[in-house]
Amino acid sequence: MRFITEIIQNTPTWVWILLAVLAALGAMQMCERTVKRFTVLIAPIALLMVGLFASPRPAYAFAWWVAAFALMLLFGFKRGRVRSGVRYLPESDALSMPGSVLPMIVMLAIFMISYMLNIAFALKPTLRGDAMVQSIAAVMLGALSGLFLARALRLFRLNNA
């Protein structure tokens, strides 16, 4: 138990603030709501920036991240479907959306993978140079980020449908 306590105590405050913000954003998306169309892009883009800049990656891992991101963005945008019940409201350029737990799951998955990866790097610094660990983490984070942004772009594009 002391091990977990040390990890929690040594986690920077900004990480807990980020977790609270993500949980609040996820909780808001679980409720039926009407939002301005452009706001569906805020969380995916913010999480994308955090994912890109939060922890440095070697060039090969960044290449894996970009490949997974691009593949899932393209796949999710082209093949994904807008959830039933989502309606575009042209008079206010807004979206009426039913609640969904999926955005919270994706946001928290991205957060937890990044958090656990940084814990592993802190406990065993040699993992930073492990190509397999870096590549697997990069693919997971890139794929989740790509799917999350693809969903937002599908929603944003509803005014053109």
Image (cartoon, rainbow, N blue to C red):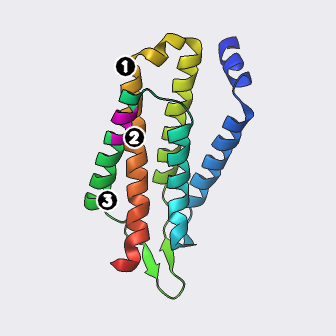
Is 63 a magenta residue?
Answer: yes
Of circles 1 and 2, the one toward us is: 1
Q: Which mark is residue 4?
A: none
**Left or right: where 12 falls relative to 161:** right
Mark number, residue 142: 2
Residue 26: image location, x then y, percent: 57, 53
Q: Amino acid at mark 1?
A: Ala
Identify the residue under disc 1: 131
User: Of the residues tagged 3 and 1, which is closer to the observer?
Assistant: 1
At x 44%, y 61%, the residue is 152
Q: Quadrant of residue 58?
A: top left
User: Type of residue at label 3?
Assistant: Phe
- Compared with residue 154, is residue 116 higher up or lower down, i.e. above or below? above
In-front residue for pair 128/43: 128
**Left or right of 21, for residue 149:** left
The residue depicted at 43 percent of the width and 38 percent of the height is 141
1 and 2 marks in contact (CB < 8 Å): no
Secondary structure beneath label 3: helix
Residue 84: % across, % down: 37, 69
Vertical order, 92 against 31 (above or below) = below
Label 1 crowding class (10 Å Cα cut-off): few <14, some 14-19, many 20+? few
The residue carrying pointer 3 sits among few (fewer than 14), some (14 to 19) or many (20 or more) residues within 10 Å by Cα, namely many
Q: Position of residue 38 (x, y in %)?
A: 52, 69
Asked if disc 3 and disc 1 are in contact, CB closer than 8 Å, the reply is no
Label 2, label 3: how many angstroms apart (C-alpha)?
15 Å
**Quarter the C terminus occupies:** bottom left
Magenta residues (range): 62-66
The kind of secondary structure element at disc 2 is: helix
Residue nearest the viewer, comparing 19 with 74: 74
**C-alpha separation, residue under disc 3 versus residue under disc 1:** 30 Å
Mark number, residue 77: 3
